[in-house]
Image (tube, grey):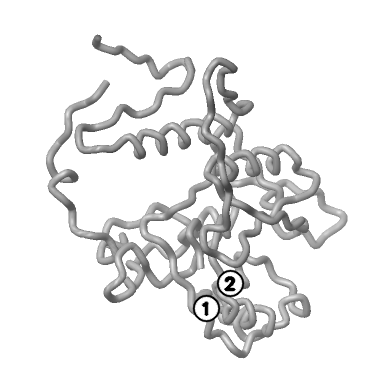
Amino acid sequence: IQMYLCNRDHYGYLPIPLKPHQTLQEDIENLIHVQIEAMIDRPPMEPSQFVSVVPKYPDKMGFDEIFMINLKRRKDRRDRMLRTLHEQEIEVKIVEAVDGNYIGRKRMQVKEPEKAVPNVLNLVEADYSYWTLGYVISLEGAQKLVGANPFGKMLPVDEFLPIMYNKHPVAEYKEHYGSRDLKAFSAEPLLIYPTHYTGQPGYLSDTETSTIWDNETVATDWDRTHSWKSRKQGHIHSNAKNTEALPPPTSLDTVPSRDEL
C-alpha cells in the first residue's frame, strides 16, 4: 500500500521502516527513539492495556555513577528526563543544579577542523565549545577541575571547561588559572543534541536570558540578535568539518536506498 504523508500538520509519530539489511533490534531502538522524541512536546505515550511490555532493567552502563543535573524548580524537565532515561534503561542519580569533554556540545570554533584522535574513529580533541549537554569525566579530570578552585573564581561552566583544557580564546580569563592541562575529547558526530535550538518554537533557557547588566538605573533589553555568543557562533565552514575522525563510507552509505515511504 502506497503511503502519502503531509508535513503541514502534526498527525502523530511513525517509526522509520526497516531497510533490508537492518535487524529487529534496530527496529526496537527506533521505536524507543520515537517515544523519546514524542515526549519533547507531549506527555509520554503509554502502552495499551491489551499488550504485554518487556520489563526494563536500568544500569549504569559500566560507569561508577551517572548524574542527572536538574533545577529543582523545573519538575517538568526532570520528569521528562527520568522517563527518557528509563526508556533507555539508564540508571542515574539526581543532583540539584543552581541558577547561575563533551558528548553533546555547541562548537564555537568553526573556522578550522578539530584534531582527530589517532587510531580512534569518531573522536576529536575538543576545541572551544559551549553546552555541557552530557559528558563523561574521569577521577583524574575531576581532581583537576576541583584543584583549580572554581568557586573562588566564579565563571560559567561553559567558559571554565575550555579554559581548563586551554582552548579559550580570551587570554584574560586564562590568566586566573595556572594549570590548564585538562584533556577534553568530543564524539564526532555528537551523541546528544538539544531538543530545541535558539529561536525555534518552544525554545526555553533557564540561564541565557540577559546580557551583562551592571547599571541599576537602566532596564535590561536583552536581544538574541545582539548577543556576543550568537555572533561568535556561525555555521561550521565546509573545510572545518571533522572529516578525519569519521570512518570511510561503506557500500550501504554510498548506494542510494529506496524511499521506504
Taking the view exactly as shown, the residue that stands out farthest to the right is 217
Tell me, yes or no, whether the two marked residues, 1 and 2, touch with CB atoms within 8 Å: yes
Report the front residue among 197 and 51. Answer: 51
Residue 131 image offset from top left, x and y in percent: 56, 58
Q: What's under tag 1, amino acid-wise?
A: Tyr
Residue 199 image offset from top left, x and y in percent: 55, 39
Up/down of 143 relative to 199, above or below: below
- What residue appears at the point 59 percent right and 17 percent down from the top-left corner? 49
Residue 213 image offset from top left, x and y in percent: 77, 58
Q: Which of the image's four quarters has the N terminus?
A: top left
- What residue appears at the point 64 percent right and 81 percent down from the top-left corner? 143
The circle drawn on residue 7 is none
The circle drawn on residue 165 is 1
- What residue appears at the point 33 percent right and 34 percent down from the top-left corner? 24
Residue 228 image offset from top left, x and y in percent: 57, 58
Taking the view exactly as shown, the residue that stands out farthest to the top is 1
| Local secondary structure at mark 2 | helix
Left or right: residue 155 compared with residue 163: right
Q: Which of the image's four quarters has the C terminus?
A: top left
Report the front residue among 214 and 180. Answer: 180
Left or right: residue 179 compared with residue 251: right
Quarter of the image holding residue 146? bottom right
Q: What's under tag 2, amino acid-wise?
A: Leu
Question: Would you call the spot at circle 2 few (<14 residues within 10 Å), some (14-19), or many (20 or more)?
Answer: many
- What residue appears at the point 43 percent right and 65 percent down from the top-left corner? 186
Up/down of 79 relative to 125, above or below: above
Q: CA distance from mark 1 to mark 2?
A: 7 Å
Pointer 2 residue: 161
| Local secondary structure at mark 1 | loop
Report the front residue among 72 and 139. Answer: 139
